[in-house]
Image (tube, grey):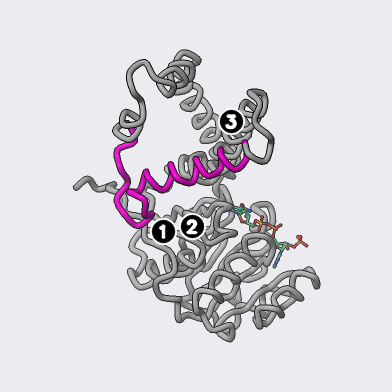
Amino acid sequence: MSKHAATATEPRNHPPSARIAVLGCGNMGHTLLQGLVSGGCPPDLLRGADPSAARRAQLKDLKIPGYATAGEAIAGADAVLVAVKPGQVPGLLREIRNTLPPGALLLSIAAGIRLRTLQAALPPDTPIVRAMPNTPALIGAGITGLCATARLDPRLRRRAEAILRSVGSTLWIEPEQLMDTVTALSGSGPAYFFYFLECLETAAVELGLPTEQARLLARHTALGAAQMSFSGNSSAAPVDLAGLRRAVTSPGGTTEAALREFQDAGLEDITRRALRAAQRRADSLSEPSE
Ligand SMILES: NC(=O)c1ccc[n+]([C@@H]2O[C@H](COP(=O)([O-])OP(=O)(O)OC[C@H]3O[C@@H](n4cnc5c(N)ncnc54)[C@H](OP(=O)(O)O)[C@@H]3O)[C@@H](O)[C@H]2O)c1
């Protein structure tokens, strides 16, 4: 088996039993807290910090204590999850560096902020994991790429995994450089599929289908195809896509006619260029080490 053979761990097996402080309770921070609670994590193990009173009020509905400052929320935490905007990370790390509980795991989901930058801003030997979730996390169907500092305690790796599994599947990525490719594929990827669905729906409406019917047909087709690519079950091994495609492409048939148009227009090359553009952009957004 190759070193990089991929097995995504499935969501929501065992809720983490650690005390977790989430710093930044916006879209992602709140989603993670919500996922943790609905996955069975007791709310009294959780804390949230956000300067916005409205964001803190949302935590009340989850019975999670909310604090205006990060320093208050991290007291006694076993894991500290950084969920502020990338530009807000340096200020936040300065705020917590002297009060981070010894041995606490620092888990950052900030796009483009590299492990070495996090390490440089925190006490030496702070265990750190960097993660890239994606927006289907909002409905518990995300996939998160994770990467850790060298020699991270396996217990802390499992803790990081358990936290992110509250909103979907997880996959360890190595070396860290590949996180830019993860950003290009799964981080930005939901938008590619939304765009393709928009194109399909528009084309079907132009061919005479009522809008609502075009929407239903396109989206159910996408869902069914995605499920088939995992043998109908996302925990099953992925199936060979070319084989699935060939099975629905009769020689001289309708599918073949459409696929030939995609191929003649260079869809494979367009996709390659699009992913490279996203990867380059992710790399350029990563700040130099401090
Ligand atoms: N959204 C996604 O799909 C997605 C996907 C992958 C990764 N991410 C990463 O997740 C992170 C959060 O993104 P988001 O979309 O959830 O952002 P967001 O909705 O803007 O949430 C960030 C929250 O953090 C608060 N905050 C700022 N400084 C703080 C501090 N010092 N202590 C505590 N809270 C503080 C912000 O308050 P103010 O608004 O008052 O500043 C805001 O409420 C980003 O780094 C992003 O790269 C997001």
The residue that disc 3 covers is: 200
Picture quadrant where residue 71 is located? bottom right
Disc 2 C-beta below 8 A from ligand 1: no
Asked if the residue under mark 2 is in contact with the one under mark 3, i.e. CB atoms within 8 Å, the reply is no
- Which of label 3 and label 2 is nearer to you? 3
The single residue placed furthest to the left in the displayed view is 1
For label 2, the crowd category at 10 Å Cα-Cα, with few meaning under 14, some 14 to 19 and many 20 or more, is many
The single residue placed furthest to the right in the displayed view is 53
Q: Residue at x 39, y 71 (%)?
A: 13
**Residue type beneath disc 3:** Leu
Q: Residue at x 33, y 63 (%)?
A: 151
Q: Is residue 149 left or right of residue 93?
A: left
Residue 47, disc: none
**Residue type beneath disc 1:** Ala
The residue that disc 1 covers is: 148
Mark closest to the chain's N terminus, 3 or 2: 2
- Residues in magenta, as a range: 214-242
The residue that disc 2 covers is: 130
Picture quadrant where residue 249 is located? top left
Q: Is residue 258 left or right of residue 173?
A: right
Asked if the residue under mark 2 is in contact with the one under mark 1, i.e. CB atoms within 8 Å, the reply is yes
Which quarter is ligand 1 in? bottom right
Mark closest to the chain's N terminus, 1 or 2: 2
Q: Position of residue 193 (x, y in %)?
A: 55, 38
Helix, strand or loop under label 2? strand
